[in-house]
Amino acid sequence: MIYEVLSFLKLRLESFLSEKRSGKEPLITLSNPWSNDDDNKNSSYLNAMSLINVEEEKTFVSQGHKIVQGKNGGYYKKEPELKVNLYVLISAYNKNYEDALKFISKVVGFFQQNNVFQKDRNNLQNDDFPVNVEKLIIELYTADFDQQSQIWGSLNMGYLPSVIYKVRMLIIDTDKADQEVSLVKEIKAGY
């Protein structure tokens, strides 16, 4: 599900960036940021969308197990759904630094205009929206200098023009039910 969400966001962003553009090569890839060790040394640019963190959403934590009815009519105990936020780094490597800054500006503009994506049940043009996702909320995340240093250090790279977004709230819920639960059929009170 994480791949599907990131792929969806990449396609939407790429579609926006490709307007009024004749080239067919991708403007952004779903990958780690560019580095000197890459095979793409001869590229004039490489803009990347990278997952840098997955965080459990603590505000809406489901407590306890659910009891769900199975296909065979029995009842089963099921673990609660997991709600997560994704932190996505969008970085711009360009041999012309000014072009990298222009790219990041366009990315910020796109997500400022499109900060909510949701499934539209009446719109059949929504084929690329991830299955089992109802809504995605995109928030600009501001990392302080120490956090930025840690991020780029962990990537073993020098800083590139970039922006971080928090993608809220992905709900991961498997259909698997763990253990059959017997029903209470009779209550006896004895005094």
Image (cartoon, grey):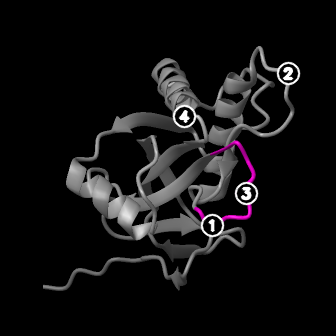
State the SS at label 3: loop
Dot placed on the residue nearer the N-terminal end, 1 or 3: 3
State the SS at label 2: loop
Indicate which label's residue lies in the foreground, 4 or 1: 4
Please name the amino acid that badge 3 sits on: Asn
Q: CA distance from mark 4 to mark 2?
A: 19 Å
Span highlighted in magenta in the image: 36-46
Residue occupying the point 59% across, 63% down: 36
Please name the amino acid that badge 2 sits on: Ser
Is 42 within the magenta? yes
Outermost residue on the top side: it is 20
Q: Which residue is mark 1?
A: 175
Please name the amino acid that badge 4 sits on: Ala
Image marks 2 and 3: residues in contact by CB distance under 8 Å? no
Q: Which residue is mark 2?
A: 22
Q: Which residue is mark 3?
A: 40
**Quick check: 105 above or below 38?**
above
State the SS at label 1: loop
